[in-house]
Image (cartoon, rainbow, N blue to C red):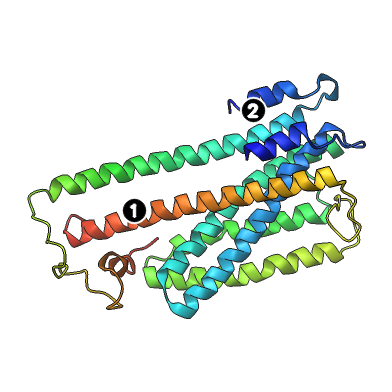
């Protein structure tokens, strides 16, 4: 993360049109990509759970979605700040990328209430997995729909007409790797903490303290 | 957060864009809040663990290799005892 920040502020050139404001790109876009990938990974792990009935996959799916939601909050906040600086508005409802991301975020925001509304652990895991798979399939479809839409107000820098200079592209890739590593580290941290709490609860129950 | 201060000072004055600093600071604050919440939850876990240890202190733990207590038997005979009990725990 430190290397990425160093590259962003001291290596990558300042963009001509947006100036320094473009530096938000190195944070906002990797966060968005990693969070969307996290949602899809959560769906894939949910498939593994339904196939194997192994609760560990459900836990991994839950943690991936949970962490993607946190990253999603960061995406929305940094995106709003960038929009304000660049377009003069905190939010532009006519922009499909923003609205589609918000739809995905709100969809996943219902995951936890749905999950914790069910008390039976087995049913909870099963229903949450079904939700994660359906919503996970919606994410790439949503992405494609936005790509195919005609209003290209949102900057496209990584498509077929990629026009990022080498140094900017390199900085972006380092930032993407840094954010992905941060995501993986926090997932591992959360997963360990969750498993420890579950183990503690089960031990307490076995010993008759609950 | 300390790392952000020199970065914020490194921003050119002329740009007038506190937006860049704001975006990065918001991200790190969010990260900090998450870590703080996790630290709080871990401290609760530690307290519960200490409580459990204190309450079960009188009971001798079974020697290694001995059959686990009642409730440790679970779905798969190959899984470790704690994994079997986790099968029934809510997330």
Where residue A136 appears, as percent x and y from the top left, is 63, 67
Residue at image location 68% in from the left, 35% down from the top: B24
Q: Residues within 10 Å of mark 2 (few under 14, many from 20)?
A: some
The residue positioned 69% from the left and 65% from the top of the image is A139
- Classify 10 Å Cα crowding around label 1: few (below 14), some (14-19), many (20 and above): many
The residue labelled by disc 2 is: B4
Looking at the picture, how far across and down is residue A167, in whole percent? 82, 43
Q: Nearer the viewer, mark 2 or mark 1?
A: 2
Rendering coords of residue A84 (x, y %): 80, 36
Indicate the secondary structure of the residue bearing disc 1.
helix
Q: Nearer the viewer, residue A145 or A198?
A: A198
Q: Are marks 2 and 1 on the same chain?
A: no
Q: Is residue A2 above or below residue A145?
A: above
* Residue B23 appears in the rendering: no
Relative vertical location of residue A158 with respect to residue A119 in this rendering, above or below: above
Can residue A165 be seen here? The reply is yes
Dot 2: chain letter: B
Whole-percent x and y of residue A8?
74, 37
The image quadrant that residue B86 belongs to is bottom left
Chain letter of mark 1 equals A
Name the residue that disc number 1 marks: A197
Task: Please indicate whether residue B72 sits to the left or right of residue A160 in the image.
Answer: left
Q: Secondary structure at mark 2?
A: helix
Residue A5 vs A64, above or below: the answer is above
Q: CA distance from mark 2 to mark 1?
A: 34 Å
Closer-to-camera residue (A135/B29): B29
User: Residue at position x 22%, y 43% from top?
Assistant: B50
């Amino acid at each position: 993360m430190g290397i990425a920040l160093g590259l962003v502020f001291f290596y990558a050139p300042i963009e001509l049109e947006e100036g320094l404001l473009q530096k938000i790109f190195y944070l906002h876009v990797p966060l968005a990509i990693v969070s969307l990938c996290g949602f899809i990974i959560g769906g894939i792990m949910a498939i593994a759970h339904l196939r194997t009935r192994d609760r560990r996959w459900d836990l991994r799916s839950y943690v991936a979605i949970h962490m993607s939601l946190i990253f999603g909050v960061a995406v929305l906040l940094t995106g709003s700040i960038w929009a304000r600086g660049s377009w003069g508005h905190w939010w532009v409802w006519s922009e499909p990328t923003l609205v589609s991301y918000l739809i995905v975020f709100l969809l996943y925001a219902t995951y936890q209430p749905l999950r914790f509304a069910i008390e039976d652990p087995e049913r909870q895991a099963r229903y949450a997995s079904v939700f994660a798979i359906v919503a996970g399939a919606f994410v790439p479809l949503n992405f494609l729909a936005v790509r195919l839409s005609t209003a290209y107000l949102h900057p496209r820098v990584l498509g077929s007409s990629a026009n990022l200079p080498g140094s900017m592209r390199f900085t972006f890739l380092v930032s993407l790797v840094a954010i992905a590593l941060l995501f993986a580290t926090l997932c591992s941290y959360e997963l360990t903490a969750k498993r420890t709490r579950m183990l503690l609860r089960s031990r307490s129950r076995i010993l008759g303290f609950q | 957060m300390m790392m952000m201060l020199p970065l914020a000072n490194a921003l050119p004055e002329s740009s007038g864009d506190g937006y860049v600093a704001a975006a990065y600071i918001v991200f790190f604050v969010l990260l900090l809040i998450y870590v703080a919440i996790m630290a709080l939850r871990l401290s609760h876990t530690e307290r519960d663990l200490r409580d459990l240890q204190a309450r079960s202190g009188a009971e001798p733990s079974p020697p290694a290799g001995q059959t686990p207590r009642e409730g440790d038997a679970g779905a798969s005979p190959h899984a470790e005892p704690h994994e079997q009990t986790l099968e029934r725990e809510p997330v």
